[in-house]
Image (tube, rainbow, N blue to C red):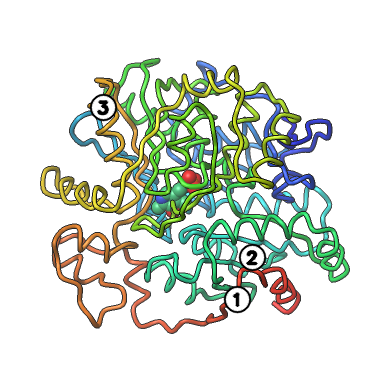
């Protein structure tokens, strides 16, 4: 399997090269040049395997420069039972009205990012070896809250790597902030920026394409890599859980072989939903992808307004901070696939996005996208209503991001009458967003409690996940704050980690 940049498909690289480097030198994102298909034999093996086996099989289809033994070794370590609270790595919980909640937050940092970031360090360090790389990999991460902690947890004290995380100072939940600033490890650095996630992500992308910075790092024996979903090594592991969910639905009788499902995903950078789209290209029977956004509804407009993407709008800080994003990076990959790998077109659209903040996709390309995707959005009040209704009617405790998806799904079902069983990505533990969830349930916050974990437990009787409970009383290690204009200057810190 070969990989090319979305902006230049002339130069082909291996999976290991794509993972080690994170982003192409032209600023494009690496993509496979074809979609492997799941055979009858594959489905039989998938059905019989546990999550670790399923993930290894799916990864093997894309990472052809890794052996089956290597991949099985990584998935066994990454998804070890003691890290995911048992053998059911990604449980599927059936609720009313066709909702199947795919819980992706049972890992060590309690958000779906663990599904990829527990295995990425294994993939990345092996990729460095396979490509003959001797420099230390410096992983730069822009985070809207959850990627940062998951990447820190995955890469802390991993030999041959250093990691630096940038998060928006006022754009993450108190729990997310505490998780990041208390991170242990000799090779980690956490920086708050005065700006939002888009500022952080754009700065990181600029650093990647800045020749002078790269040359300076190279002299110090350092190279750059990424743990954001711009890295193919982040996306590939995410494909597995959609296939695994379908296997679980086959086993429970929720669907028959070949019967279609919908997939509804609370979306920010468009990585998670794109992984589901790729699963469909491999043969997963999907009717519609439902793209759910919060008040930052740039994607809803894109899908509903004929393929016009326009980030020139107000940015809102919401109760679902991990989706407070106006530049959804992985949409670039969808455009590449849907246009039949048209690198010139993608390069042109991304130039327009960089220059003027907007672009419009040609109607023939958009028609294909529209056939696959539906979309919707909701505000914080509607999110809170949904959390309350889910708890009172179905005794299901949902975080703010997942609630956005549920709300948008219910609106979709009422509008279209489509009763196809639907997998809804449940992306974080409600205990990461205690304040919003407690307020939604009509509870009272405890003034002296930073984490509010006990308040939410008192209100619902649901126990907080152990890794979050363990944070109580920990002292933050990192307090650096920089202006968004000064992000580039912080790269110098990497040398001394
Ligand atoms: C990252 C995140 C999202 C958005 O996922 P994307 O892959 O960026 O679209 C949604 N919910 C939670 C809880 C997240 O951490």
The answer to which image quadrant residue 293 occupies is top left
**Ligand 1 within 8 Å of the CB at mark 1:** no
C-alpha separation, residue under disc 1 versus residue under disc 2: 26 Å
Residue density around tag 1, few if under 14, some if 14–19, many if 20 or more, within 10 Å: some
Does residue 4 appear anywhere in the picture?
yes
Residue density around tag 2, few if under 14, some if 14–19, many if 20 or more, within 10 Å: some
Quickly name the residue at label 3.
Answer: 413
Quickly name the residue at label 1.
Answer: 482
Camera-near label (2 vs 3) is: 3
Q: State which tag comes first along the sequence, 1 or 2.
A: 2
SS at mark 3 in the image: helix
| Location of residue 418 in the rendering, given as x and y in whole percent from the top left corner | 28, 20
Disc ID at residue 158: 2
Does residue 112 appear anywhere in the picture?
no
Q: Is residue 17 above or below residue 342?
A: below
SS at mark 2 in the image: loop
Residue at the spot 37% in from the left edge and 75% down from the top edge: 471
Total residue callouts: 3
Image quadrant for the C terminus? bottom right
The answer to which image quadrant residue 333 occupies is top right
SS at mark 1 in the image: strand
| Location of residue 5 in the rendering, given as x and y in whole percent from the top left corner | 74, 37
């Amino acid at each position: 399997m070969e990989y090319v940049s979305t902006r230049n498909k002339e130069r082909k690289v291996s999976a290991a090269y794509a993972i080690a480097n994170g982003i192409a030198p032209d600023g494009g994102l690496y993509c496979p040049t074809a979609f492997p298909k799941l055979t009858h034999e594959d489905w039989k093996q998938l059905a019989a395997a546990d999550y670790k086996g399923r993930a290894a099989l799916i990864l093997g289809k894309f990472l052809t420069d890794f052996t089956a033994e290597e991949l099985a070794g990584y998935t066994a370590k990454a998804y070890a039972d003691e890290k995911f609270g048992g053998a059911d790595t990604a449980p599927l919980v059936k609720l009313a009205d066709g909702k199947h909640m795919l819980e992706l937050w049972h890992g060590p940092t309690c958000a779906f990012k663990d599904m990829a970031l527990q295995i990425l360090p294994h993939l990345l360090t092996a990729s460095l070896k396979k490509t003959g790389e001797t420099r230390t990999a410096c992983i730069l991460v822009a985070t809207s809250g959850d990627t940062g902690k998951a990447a820190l947890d995955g890469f802390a004290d991993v030999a041959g790597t250093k990691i630096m995380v940038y998060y928006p100072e006022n754009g993450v939940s108190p729990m997310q902030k505490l998780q990041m600033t208390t991170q242990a490890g000799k090779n980690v650095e956490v920086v708050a920026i005065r700006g939002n996630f888009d500022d952080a992500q754009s700065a990181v992308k600029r650093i990647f394409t800045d020749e002078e910075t790269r040359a300076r790092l190279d002299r110090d024996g350092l190279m750059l890599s990424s743990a954001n979903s711009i890295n193919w090594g982040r996306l590939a592991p995410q494909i597995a859980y959609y296939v695994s969910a379908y296997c679980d639905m086959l086993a429970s009788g929720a669907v028959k072989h070949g019967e279609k499902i919908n997939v509804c995903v609370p979306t920010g950078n468009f990585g998670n939903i794109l992984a589901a789209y790729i699963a469909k290209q491999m043969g997963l029977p999907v009717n519609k992808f439902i793209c759910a956004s919060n008040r930052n509804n740039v994607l809803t407009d894109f899908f509903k307004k004929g393929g016009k993407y326009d980030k020139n709008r107000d940015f809102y800080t919401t109760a679902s901070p991990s989706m407070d994003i106006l530049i959804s990076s992985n949409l670039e990959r969808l455009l590449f696939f849907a246009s039949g790998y048209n690198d010139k077109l993608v390069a042109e659209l991304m130039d327009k996005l960089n220059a003027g903040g907007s672009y419009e996709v040609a109607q023939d390309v958009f028609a294909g996208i529209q056939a696959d995707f539906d979309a919707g959005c909701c505000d914080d009040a509607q999110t809170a209503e949904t959390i309350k209704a889910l708890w009172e009617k179905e005794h299901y405790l949902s975080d703010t991001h997942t609630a956005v998806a549920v709300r948008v799904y219910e609106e979709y079902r009422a509008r279209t009458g489509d009763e196809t069983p639907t997998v809804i990505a449940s992306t974080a533990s409600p205990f990461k967003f205690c304040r919003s969830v407690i307020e939604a349930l009509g509870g009272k916050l405890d003034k002296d409690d930073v984490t509010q974990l006990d308040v939410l437990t008192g209100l619902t009787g649901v126990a907080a996940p152990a890794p979050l409970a363990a944070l109580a009383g920990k002292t933050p290690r990192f307090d650096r704050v920089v202006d968004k204009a000064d992000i580039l200057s912080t790269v110098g810190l990497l040398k001394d980690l």
